[in-house]
Amino acid sequence: MITLDVALGERSYPIYIGVELLHRADLIRRHLAGNEVMVVSNDTVAPLYLERVMAALDGVRAEAVILPDGEEYKTLAQLDTIFTALLEQRCSRQVTILALGGGVIGDMAGFAAACYQRGVPFIQIPTTLLAQVDSSVGGKTAVNHPLGKNMIGAFYQPRCVIADTTVLDTLDARQLSAGIAEVIKYGLICDKELFAWLEKNMEALVARDRDALSYAIERSCRNKAEVVAADELEHGRRALLNLGHTFGHAIETGMGYGQWLHGEAVAAGMVMATDLSARLGWLGAEDVRRVEKLVARAQLPTRGPALSVDKMKALMAVDKKVQDGRIRLVLLKALGEAVVSDAFDPVLLDRTLAECQA
Amino acid sequence: MITLDVALGERSYPIYIGVELLHRADLIRRHLAGNEVMVVSNDTVAPLYLERVMAALDGVRAEAVILPDGEEYKTLAQLDTIFTALLEQRCSRQVTILALGGGVIGDMAGFAAACYQRGVPFIQIPTTLLAQVDSSVGGKTAVNHPLGKNMIGAFYQPRCVIADTTVLDTLDARQLSAGIAEVIKYGLICDKELFAWLEKNMEALVARDRDALSYAIERSCRNKAEVVAADELEHGRRALLNLGHTFGHAIETGMGYGQWLHGEAVAAGMVMATDLSARLGWLGAEDVRRVEKLVARAQLPTRGPALSVDKMKALMAVDKKVQDGRIRLVLLKALGEAVVSDAFDPVLLDRTLAECQA
């Protein structure tokens, strides 16, 4: 087991990465606030892993609330289901909320923890690659709104993150690829070595080679922990972690939540950001080809869906990075070096949007 | 105009108290984050004061969302109405949310500000006595759940509070009395002098004598600001501000939100807390009579509604102060000296609940 620290002063916490961690009662118990736990999971993950987690909680007053699986259920209505379960069980302010699932469950359970009785402790047990390398770390929680993704939420840090790599064995191939998208992201924004490693090892990663997965998860979490420690509330550098996300969120909202997986939309979005960076003269054609090729080898889409340029731009205009009415994007000065910029000719953005779709 | 400071380090802010402050554009403008404002108000207050506030915001991109008036609308569903308005207007992270209304509007607008895009600035313009003396100060925001009052929320401080005493002229008598309940509360928990002043000046206060109102508001805000500065997140002393509230929340939830005004339920709850304190031998019969008399002179109920003891206890068991399954109550060691305690014989609580109802 590897332990990484997210250094946030009083809110610091460990990320545990390793095999067979799910039944490690000691890991969970040392982070409980009291003797009450509410597990939040979904109907795909619960049948596989809930029993194991409940066994590790033997002797604790533990209940579970099971939500339907999918991004289309990351709503205020489902959040209310969590609150109702907590109140029906008369859970007190000493309850610890435990997220057992992928990014959707982590985001919703974390937001519920931030709001229930104005804040109770929570623990992340991510069960998808995407959640293990990205969404479970850093304290961003949210639900979607029909008019914009992740628009309602809180910055709220977990007590710990337990990333059991064994659970990735049961992850379907599409979800695995979606997680690899976020690994590629770290390579592109700040980690040239990781990008080079991915170019050598993509097939091993897709084949779930255990060592390759471990390396990708640890390296991604190190990158994420470092960025979050430097800028918890996204006043600056943290925004770089949104490479491909302004495009990606527009795709997810525009297509209807759940049609494109978040990682798939981010993959197409990263190609768009790379394409626009090349149009600005910051990258060469060879760089664009390298990114497209790596994305394709990860079994991810290199093109967005058929949404009109106007529709994409309207959806991008509700992005959280918008300032004074101007869309700000994460773009690439080089492979491994991202910047946030609004200094691009809108005509070039139109071209990117028109040409980077299927 | 008086300016009080709520001393919370980086989150410190001023409370402005005075006449004719609503049209003071300078007060509002100095606390705006950007050039966007969303006013949240209700259908009672907006017709009276929205135009004046909008005039003060001349030149700012200001929109308004008007909710139905009443505690029964302090729900996740109405919160979503605020989010929809913000997104339809494409409000960015630089938007300032401005609460124009009583406690319900302040709690909802504040919680919306805490969650929209994971947090945007907000300003409180309380228009009821209750909001001016209590709920607008201190950063507690929330919505109700059918199973428990204020169960979903956040600690989120405003940029400033603007208490214009002129607006109390249009407040209906029942609402005025509800606000006086919270003034009495400060007297009982920590301010013997205020309690004595109230015993001398209650009729002037009920008659809206301007000097009496000013004194009551300033003194209450000073008490509140001091307690909140010492214990922002309610790890200890801040819980004293909940005198009468565990009983009161049970009354509000049990009767259906909006049937009893919050201040009315708190008034009956304070008499219950006083009664139980006397049963514990902490207060004398004369103290109980003084409290009941003062509450009655404020035109407030001295008895709770007819709810069974079991129902009241079940509702009180979801209170946020519950620890290890035990109900903790704010009780009185003397008039002007409150404590939080679970060290009472449950039989005495039963007697209080049975005897302090209509």
Image (cartoon, coloured by chain):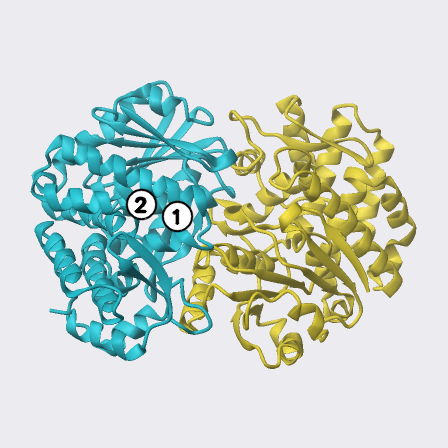
Chain colours: A yellow, B cyan
Could you tell me which quadrant the C terminus of chain B lies in?
bottom left
Which quadrant holds residue A269? Answer: top right
Mark on residue B153? none
Mark on residue B135? 2
Q: Chain of mark 1?
A: B
Q: Nearer the viewer, residue B40 or A182?
A: B40
* Label 2 CA crowd tier, 10 Å (few <14, some 14–19, many 20+): many
* Label 1 CA crowd tier, 10 Å (few <14, some 14–19, many 20+): many
Q: Position of residue B105 (x, y in %)?
A: 30, 44
Q: Are marks 2 and 1 in contact (CB under 8 Å)?
A: yes
Q: CA distance from mark 2 to mark 1?
A: 7 Å
Q: Amino acid at mark 2?
A: Ser
Give the side of residue A139 with respect to residue A188, left or right.
left
Q: Chain of mark 2?
A: B
Q: Amino acid at mark 1?
A: Lys
Label 2 and label 1 in one chain: yes
Residue under the point 29% across and 60% down: B333
Q: Position of residue B18 (x, y in %)?
A: 24, 27
Marker count (numbered): 2
Q: Residue furthest right?
A: A200
Q: Secondary structure at mark 1?
A: strand
Give the side of residue A268 with respect to residue A211, left or right.
left
Q: Tell me if I can see residue B327 in this picture.
A: yes
* Residue occupied by mark 1: B140
Q: Position of residue B28 (x, y in %)?
A: 35, 25
Give the side of residue B125 with respect to residue A175, left or right.
left
Labels 2 and 1: the sequence-earlier one:
2
